[in-house]
Amino acid sequence: MPGHGGEDYKDLLLFLAAAGVVAPLFSRLKLSPVLGFLAAGVLLGPHGLGRFADQAPWLAWLTITDREQVAVLSELGVAFLLFMIGLELSWERLKALRRLVFGFGLTQVVLCSLVLAGGFLLAGQSLGAAAVAGLALALSSTAVVMPTLAESGRLKSGVGRATFAVLLAQDVSVAPILITVAVIAAVVGAGAAAGPDAGAVGTALLSLVPAAIGLGLLVLLGRLVVRPLFRLVARADGSELFVAAAMLVVVGAGTAAQAAGLSMSLGALVAGLLLAETEYRRAVESHIEPFKGLLLGVFFVGVGIGLDLDAVAADPVTVFGLAALLTLTKAVLIAGLARAWGLGWRAALEIGLVLGPAGEFAFVILNTGLVEGLATPAFTQALMVSATLSLFSIPLLAAVGQRLAQRLPQRPTEEETAPGPEAEAEADEARTLIVGFGRVGRLVSELLSEHGQPWLAVDADAAAVTAARREGLPVVYGDAARPDLLRRLGVAGARALVITMDSPAKIDEVAAAARAARSDLILIARARDDRHAARLYAMGVTDAVPETTEASLQLAENTLVDLGVPMGLVLASIHERRDQYRQLFQAAAPEGRGDRPARALRSTRRNAPPAGR
């Protein structure tokens, strides 16, 4: 059989090197990994080290040459990003953020699109090219802005709340913008063929009917297929199958959308929306998060590869001037809108600067406009270069905005001081998490409900989750031993976590993951026996409840009551004995695992009447 040269895998090795070295290095420097992928793309592209390959042939091994393969993976990365956005766009979240999202956010998208499109139109571009450019550049970068705000601790501030709302509005707008670009292309095409009249517009709109039908069928089939598919995979109890099913849904929905004349990204967004209200949402998020980050990294590497340094060097004034003008125009418009929506000057300045640069979807929309023939390759390339340069400026602009805002007089407005959507989200998370929804977990949930305590349960048994969801109970599917799933369940804001499963090994895994996630979390775990209880206390649980001991105490309580001993005395003695056992378990825990805790417990029990085994 013919052998394969190392060049067959060269591009893959280079990308993995970028993902394994460059991105972590940027994270260590407290910069967004996205900037690392962009820089890696510039460095490893044909306009970076590749331009010197003629003088030093060995540099060809450090150059990504197969741009078509990178482009395919980049499209898949964008699809996964939109899929994750769809998963996050639950009706509850949109309702909590409705004023800022549908007010401030959508107003920003419309106003920036109109102003930027008007500017390009005055600069001599065609109506179609100006419209596509305005729609594309009106969006900002969720992938860069959100990590930047998180690293500076600004996500839960008034600035973070408003910024997130605008980014969410932009994410919601992506699908309508892609459809709008298709409509513009159809209108321009029909107008070029038959003249710009009402008939051309009607013909263009009729050309979208197959796409609309395809989208409707995609939604219908998704509702019929997606939930049963994940229920079947969940019952198979294999995390690799869950990942495969998630990827199948993303790629399948994207391919179906493409067959209907829509974009792959739009199909992935629809798939995410269909899964957002199911019990498998959080499990899907936790399973595909690493793949989304990796594929999105491919996307940004592809963007960096496309940055033509020769074009920048040939006309740096135009390129940097366009990037600066774009950022300044958006910053002024967004800051003005922030003021109009009740935010103070400090917040408005920060929001305007951080959202001024272009976003990742600008490249998707500009490429769509190029494919549809609305913009020339030269114009599209100039915009992409400027947009890429603006992306690199986000961390710097965020720092500058925060520094300038500190110098302005602080007069918080009502909008900034009012409890925001993130406070509502934290209130939703301030609940008890129940791991395992069998007989014990259901009883715990019923008692919590009786006393007005909110709760959320998670179980890895798909049948049990389905049955509970039919009753309208807040139960989701997933493996609580996964730290990423615990994070998505809201462990950071949970009041307590109760482990009710009957598998000692699984109980230990969940207890270890929960304690690692939060050192101050109230952690209550079911234990098989005294030895298991001691082991759980050694792992840091707040309370361990051994089944054998509790059964013995219940038998003793019933016996004393039936013998006529007053209930008050019985309860007092049972509580006292339970406290004694808890102290024994806790005292035994530091002595080690295995038989030593059990031996310590047995030796201590000689002074107390046995409660039975």
Image: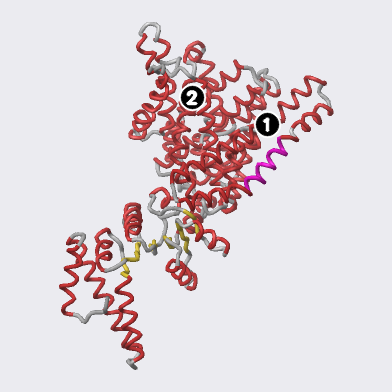
Question: Is 96 placed above or below 8 here?
Answer: below
Would you say 33 lies left or right of 69 here?
Answer: left
SS at badge 1: loop
* Residue 255 sits in quarter: top right
Q: Give the spatial CA distance, label 2 vs label 1.
A: 24 Å
| Residue type for callout 2 | Gly
Question: In front: mark 2 or mark 1?
Answer: 1
Q: Is residue 220 magenta?
A: yes
User: Where's residue 397, x and y in %?
Assistant: 45, 32
Q: Residues within 10 Å of mark 1 (few under 14, many from 20)?
A: some
SS at badge 2: helix
x 38%, y 27%: residue = 18
Q: Main secondary structure of the magenta part?
A: helix
Any part of residue 438 in sight: yes
Quarter of the rendering occupied by the N terminus: top left
Q: Residues within 10 Å of mark 2 (few under 14, many from 20)?
A: many
| Residue type for callout 1 | Gly
| Pointer 1 residue | 261
Question: Is 409 placed above or below 306 here?
Answer: below
Q: Name the residue at the front extreme.
A: 1
| Pointer 2 residue | 302
x 51%, y 46%: residue = 161
Q: Earlier in the sequence, mark 2 or mark 1?
A: 1
x 27%, y 64%: residue = 532
Q: Is residue 477 magenta?
A: no
Query: Range of the magenta residues?
Result: 211-223
User: Where's residue 118, x and y in %?
Assistant: 67, 26
User: Where's residue 412, x and y in %?
Assistant: 49, 49
Question: Is 440 placed above or below 73 here?
Answer: below
Would you say 256 lies left or right of 41 here?
Answer: right
Q: Name the residue at the top extreme.
A: 55
User: Where's residue 227, x and y in %?
Assistant: 57, 50
